[in-house]
Image (tube, grey):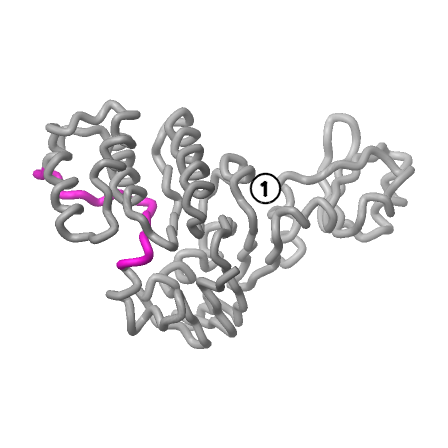
Amino acid sequence: MDTLIKGQGLTKRFGRKQVLDGIDLEIKRGQIVGLVGVNGAGKSTLLGAILGLLPVDGDLQVLGQDPLHHRAKLLERVTYISDVASLPRWAKVSQLLKYMAATHPRFSAERCRAILAGTDIPLDAKVKQLSKGMVTQLHLALITAIDAELLVLDEPTLGLDVVYRKGFYQRLLEDYFDHQKTILITTHEVEEVEHLLTHVLFLHGGKLVLDSPVEELAQRFCELEVGKAELEAARALGPLAERSTLGGHLLTFERPADELAGLGRVGSPSLADLFVAKAGRAA
């Protein structure tokens, strides 16, 4: 499996603030990677470095090239969807399709029209006539119709209703299986993308606090639900996090589930709960 993104010792400061703090990462072809972190964790800075938008200290290679010095070449093979859709308000939808077809060698107008057929967006409408949600849908359709090797998504469905969000991620999954694209995605709606991901990166305070294939999470982490009588014994085993429930207490551990047998009900934490546990431990 080829390595598409490799970073070693990535560091970035803005004044006194350490935004990235010695990050090592490797993203391989065919992975769908979730970059999870709270606001201010360094996600946007890391994405900016990968896209060649800002310099960082350390060594960073994207598709075998330095993104800062070869950004024009990379943009032929990398696509990016930001959390804010910005399209010319005077343009018609059909004009945007023609413009994209004329300027990007990997854009498919046919695929874009097929995506738009699942929306209420007419091809003869101007951008200024569309609702905010429709503009976001149009932006997503234009970008995902590009046959890119690497797709970077930064909160791609922000402002969309739940029906369209689910439809977008379903199309994304189908496209992934069809073409083996590599996708790097950040989102606050972790539950909506959890089933898509093959790999997760947890970023907290500029550091990676977790870098793991999704398939290994169930073997590394577990949740234990206990009553009051077993609580102290469970706490003695060093949980990452603890929270109260209606029936007792739920503790998150970084240890095999069989080591907790007999103390209570054992299960697997959700990705969101696992992030809260790891970030809280790091803090």
Residue 7 at x, y percent in the picture: 48, 69
Residue 210 lies within the magenta run? no
Instruction: Decide which of 240, 169 is in the foreground and name it.
Output: 169
Q: Which residue is label 1 attached to?
A: 272
- What residue do we see at 50% from left, 35% from top? 192
In the image, the segment drawn in magenta is 76-91
Tell me if residue 101 comes above or below residue 46 in the rendering: above
Tell me if residue 10 comes above or below residue 236 in the rendering: below
Residue 227 at x, y percent in the picture: 85, 32
- What residue do we see at 64% from left, 58% from top? 282
The rendered magenta stretch, by its main secondary structure, is classed as loop
Instruction: Decide which of 129, 282 is in the foreground and name it.
Output: 129
Quadrant that contains the C terminus: bottom right
Left or right: 84, with 238 as reference point: left
Element under label 1? Answer: helix
Residue 84 lies within the magenta run? yes
Residue 96 at x, y percent in the picture: 14, 41
Furthest-left residue in this view: 90
- What residue do we see at 78% from left, 26% from top? 247
Residue 148 at x, y percent in the picture: 33, 52
Looking at the picture, which amino acid does disc 1 mark?
Answer: Ala
Q: Residues within 10 Å of mark 1 (few under 14, many from 20)?
A: some
